[in-house]
Image: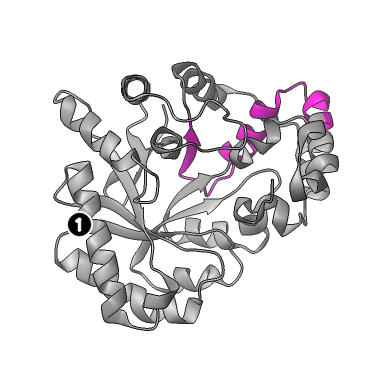
Amino acid sequence: MEYTELRGYNIPKMTLGTVALGMDYGISNPAGKPVKEKSFEILSTALSLGINAFDTARIYGDAERLVGNFLNHDENRPKTNLITKFVISNNNLVNIELARTQVYESVKSSCSFLKLKQIPICLFHKALGQNMEALMEILPIIFADLKNDGLIDLAGVSIYNPYGEEMFLEHPVFEAFQVPVNVFDQRTIRNGMLKQMHQGNKIVFARSVYLQGLFFLSPDILKGNLVNARPYILALQDLARQASMSIAELAFSYVRDLEAVTSIVFGATTELQLHENVKLLLGSKIPLKIKQSIESLFNNMPEDIITPGLWTT
């Protein structure tokens, strides 16, 4: 496993996302979340493979409780970097005291479930359409309070739409970012956000590498507004054939080789999936011609395809 020393943490190139362990999640995951014993095996295998970072959130069902119980169960576990998130409702954005109360309740609950006195990396999970100006008035203050009270170490944000959200980069309190990046979603590359994060020594977690499993679905079974993704999925399959790579290899390698990405957040509901994803770290680079085709064909993807929150299925 590759690691990056950044802001006091030894961050692995891969971070295990736990949303699928805490709730039914993913368009290509019909089996749903694993049982507790199987989830413990997955977490244990991840650590044995050198994946010492787990990503979770208050809104991920039972994920925080599961991770906390697992880590508390194994006293001989390696040191683990935990990332969790909180939300702020739109109604509370207009009043910093209401927002602070909501955030503190969420973070203290996270500490309780994860069995920690302090959250190592705490991210604000920004919802689609939330007002940036209102957020920038209250978030830096609340994060400073959380730090002063010893409830969190590093502060950051998890975003959906990188347009307009460059404002987060303007304040030093935000030290870690989680952003969607994949062959279809190149927005943070095109608008320069990834480059700015890298230049600012930010920890960058790239999520949605497989776009919640959309890349693996047959175009013929797509429903709702995802039928519009059919020509793009077919084009992706064709590029993978040209590169003599699987869809997973192509999608993973594209994000893996972005200089600004500190760690790739990926999900797994079986140990086999864990091993398969780790092997991708050693995979071949995408041929230059294919990479150029990816950046040309998927340069300006429709928002309702690259944003799962807008899917209708």
For label 1, the residue is 108
Q: Residue furthest top?
A: 272
Q: Look at label 1 and name its amino acid.
A: Lys
Position in image of residue 146 (x %, y %): 21, 66
The picture places residue 288, in percent across and down from the top left corner, at: 76, 36
User: Is residue 277 left or right of 117 when viewed as pictured?
Assistant: right
**In terms of image quadrants, where is residue 149?**
bottom left
User: What residue is at 41 percent from the left and 69 percent from the top?
Assistant: 89
Coloration mode: one colour
The residue lying at 49 percent from left, 23 percent from top is 278
Res. 120 in view: yes
Query: Is 293 inside the magenta-drawn segment?
Result: no
Eyeballing the image, is 295 above or below 36?
Answer: below
Image quadrant where one finds the N terminus:
top left
Residue 250 lies in the magenta-colored region? yes
Q: Position of residue 308 (x, y in %)?
A: 62, 50
The residue under the point 30% across, 42% down is 64
> Residue 214: x percent and y percent?
67, 37
Q: Which picture quadrant has residue 37? A: top left
Give the quarter of the figure containing the C terminus.
Answer: top right
Q: Which residues are magenta?
A: 238-267
Instruction: Please tell me whether residue 132 is drawn above or below residue 302 in the rendered image.
Output: below
Q: Is residue 228 or residue 263 the one in the foreground? A: 228
Up the image or down, 311 lies above or below 68; here it is below
